[in-house]
Image (tube, rainbow, N blue to C red):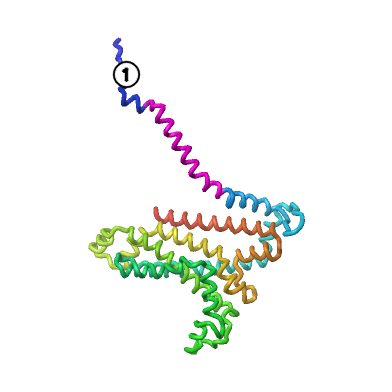
């Protein structure tokens, strides 16, 4: 019976199997430096998100007035939410607003992206023009449209009156559909540039050779768009839809400034109702419960969107 002697590993192999102590110390030092660099961000996250979230969860189980002693009431706030007609009406209007806003923003953003997708100076100039409203605050944009559509003195109202479409003295915010249309116009003007930028990045990431190959095979422009562009654009569409739906479900500023919830409380969104519950009725516990319910709904909707688009990507 023969015995095979295995030679000891060379210096290079030994260095890999047993790294020097200096390398281990260097790796530990880098981990410590990385943790120190991330510490400020983690501190901000804890102070401004995690702790307020924990506090909100705690408040949701109490009858918590603005002034007075909080009283524990269990899940009564959550039960009340499903029987509160004001909140249910606000949720219904929020869903209507989301259904109207999401396709409108997607179509307008896609049209703008198609118009400026060429890498030319003119295209870059119009990219900047279309994106400018995005940098304006939502409140500022709302006040701008409020002044534009004021009865008698608003320039847009005077223009519509000059062409005979409306009476210049008409209060457009007193009618449900005209008020909602003004809000939709403002949001489209404000957000379409961001949608354009996201969709443009997706369009420009599609290789030109793929479209050319499809055309060589005899595909029409519509077939290239349907069977080549849209499937390759699906990840970008998922991101755009999540942003759009989340923004619509959390709508507040535009209705608080433009319509103040009118006419007859018909344009009160879910977040607006939470604001009224917490800071007008001073029922902080119930407002916290409504906030958590809205957060859960928003998470479920976003997860469902991502899951559906992911499954269709593999189908």
Quadrant in which the N terminus is drawn: top left
Q: Main secondary structure of the magenta part?
A: helix
Decide if residue 272 is on the left or right side of residue 306: right
Q: Position of residue 46 (x, y in %)?
A: 57, 48
Task: State which region is magenta.
Answer: 17-45
Using the image as rendered, state which of residue 165 and residue 190 is in the foreground: 190
- Helix, strand or loop at label 1? It is loop
Q: Residue at x 61, y 49 (%)?
A: 51
* Other residues around mark 1 within 10 Å, as few (<14) / some (14–19) / many (≥20): few
Q: Position of residue 116 (x, y in %)?
A: 34, 68
State whether residue 110 is above or below residue 12: below
State whether residue 231 is above or below residue 51: below
Report the number of numbered marks: 1
Q: Residue at x 39, y 62 (%)?
A: 199
- For this orientation, the residue located farthest to the left is 216
Using the image as rendered, state which of residue 211 and residue 198 is in the foreground: 198
Where, by quadrant of the figure, is residue 70 drawn? Answer: bottom right
State whether residue 163 is above or below residue 140: below
Decide if residue 234 is on the left or right side of residue 251: left
The residue at which mark 1 appears reads as: 8
State whether residue 221 is above or below residue 163: above
Q: Residue at x 30, y 22 (%)?
A: 10
Quadrant in which the C terminus is drawn: bottom left
Q: Is residue 69 magenta?
A: no
Q: Is residue 36 magenta?
A: yes
Q: Position of residue 71 (x, y in %)?
A: 75, 53
Where, by quadrant of the figure, is residue 15 drawn? Answer: top left
Using the image as rendered, state which of residue 186 and residue 103 is in the foreground: 186
- For this orientation, the residue located farthest to the top is 1
């Amino acid at each position: 019976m023969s015995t095979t002697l295995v030679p000891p590993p060379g210096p290079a192999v030994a260095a890999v199997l047993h790294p020097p102590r200096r390398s281990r110390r260097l790796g530990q030092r880098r981990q410590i430096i990385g943790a120190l660099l991330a510490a400020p961000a983690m501190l901000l996250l804890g102070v401004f998100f995690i702790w307020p979230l924990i506090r909100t969860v705690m408040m949701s189980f109490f009858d918590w007035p603005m002034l007075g002693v909080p009283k524990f009431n269990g899940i009564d706030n959550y039960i009340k939410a499903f029987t509160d007609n004001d909140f249910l009406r606000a949720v219904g209007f929020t869903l209507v607003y989301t259904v109207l806003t999401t396709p409108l923003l997607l179509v307008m953003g896609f049209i703008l992206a198609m118009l400026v997708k060429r890498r030319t100076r003119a295209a870059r100039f119009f990219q900047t023009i279309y994106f400018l409203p995005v940098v304006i605050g939502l409140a500022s944009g709302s006040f701008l449209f409020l002044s534009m559509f004021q009865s008698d003195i608003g320039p847009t109202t005077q223009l519509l009156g000059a062409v005979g479409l409306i009476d210049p003295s008409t209060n457009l915010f007193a009618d449900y559909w005209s008020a909602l249309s003004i809000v939709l116009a403002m949001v489209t003007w404000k957000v379409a540039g961001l949608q354009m930028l996201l969709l443009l990045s997706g369009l420009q990431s599609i290789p030109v050779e793929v479209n050319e190959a499809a055309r060589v095979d005899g595909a029409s422009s519509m077939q290239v768009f349907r069977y080549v562009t849209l499937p390759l654009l699906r990840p970008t569409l998922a991101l755009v839809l999540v942003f759009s739906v989340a923004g619509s479900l959390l709508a507040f500023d535009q209705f608080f400034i433009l319509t103040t919830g009118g006419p007859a409380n018909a344009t009160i969104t879910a977040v607006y109702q939470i604001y009224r519950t917490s800071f007008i009725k001073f029922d902080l516990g119930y407002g916290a419960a409504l906030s958590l319910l809205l957060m859960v709904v928003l998470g479920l909707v976003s997860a469902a969107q991502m899951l559906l688009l992911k499954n269709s990507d593999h189908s």
